[in-house]
Image (tube, helix red, strand yellow):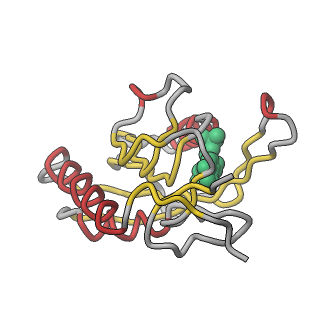
């Protein structure tokens, strides 16, 4: 059974914001080729919209990580699978669904830098404020409250990823 969800952003609002991010990226990288690296599974829907809105020569690759949150302070991030093509010399944009503690993105940044990209930026659909990382994130779709967010790729125990809107679980 699906939990009761309070809608934060409708499908129209999300699509409009993603189109804005895509335009911004198109402007910022004008005349260059870029590589989007999506973080599975959560980023798959956002990345599909973003990639189609970007008017540049664009490669798409994916990584998957798992985090063990046995203890909040010591959550360990581990690589499940890596990019399939070398990123050396490329302008890479890491595409995330949501940044909460920032641990996943910090880990992935360090990891991808080892591949010697020409540049590495971060684009996240959602951002939960309060981790002091905001200045380090290059593109943010929406800043959301510190609630459990679902929809548009984000799940609750495997469900809700296919909801076309973004909301939080009430209660
Ligand atoms: P962080 O490492 O704490 O920044 O968490 C990042 C990852 O945890 C995200 O990529 C999501 O997969 C997951 N996550 C964090 N907050 C939420 C949420 O509110 N809803 C669904 N997934 C979340
Ligand atoms: Mg994620």
Quarter-of-image position of residue 52? bottom left
Q: On the rendered structure, is 33 left or right of 113?
A: left
Closer to the camera, 54 or 98? 98
Residue at 80 percent across and 31 percent down: it is 74
Q: On the rendered structure, is 17 left or right of 48?
A: left
Using the image, determine if residue 82 lies above or below residue 88: below
Q: On the rendered structure, is 6 left or right of 141?
A: right
Toward the right, the furthest residue is: 70
Q: How many numbered dots are placed on residues in this image?
A: 0
Where residue 49 appears, as percent x and y from the top left, is: 34, 68
Where residue 63 appears, as percent x and y from the top left, is: 58, 59
Where residue 30 appears, as percent x and y from the top left, is: 13, 50
Using the image, determine if residue 150 lies above or below residue 137: below
Closer to the camera, 11 or 115? 11
Residue at 36 percent across and 43 percent down: it is 140
Ligand 2 is in which quadrant of the figure?
Answer: bottom right
Where residue 22 appears, as percent x and y from the top left, is: 24, 57
Using the image, determine if residue 91 lies above or below residue 101: below
Q: On the rendered structure, is 10 left or right of 42?
A: left
Query: Which quadrant of the rendered structure holds the N terminus?
Result: bottom right
Residue at 44 percent across and 66 percent down: it is 165
């Amino acid at each position: 059974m699906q939990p009761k969800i309070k809608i934060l952003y409708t499908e129209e609002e999300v699509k409009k914001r993603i189109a804005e991010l895509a335009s911004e990226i198109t402007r910022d990288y004008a005349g260059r080729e870029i590589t989007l690296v999506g973080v599975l599974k959560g980023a798959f829907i956002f990345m599909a919209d973003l990639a189609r809105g970007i008017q540049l020569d664009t490669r798409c690759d994916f990584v998957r990580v798992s985090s063990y949150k046995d203890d909040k302070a010591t959550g360990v991030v581990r690589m499940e699978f890596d990019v399939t093509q070398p990123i050396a010399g490329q302008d890479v944009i890491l595409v995330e669904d949501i940044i909460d503690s920032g641990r996943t993105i910090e880990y992935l940044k360090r990891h991808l830098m080892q591949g010697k990209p020409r540049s590495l930026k971060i684009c996240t659909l959602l951002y939960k404020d309060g981790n002091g990382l905001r200045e380090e994130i290059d593109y943010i779709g929406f800043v959301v409250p510190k609630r459990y967010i679902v929809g548009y790729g984000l799940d609750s125990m495997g469900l809700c990823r296919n909801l076309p809107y973004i909301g939080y679980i009430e209660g």
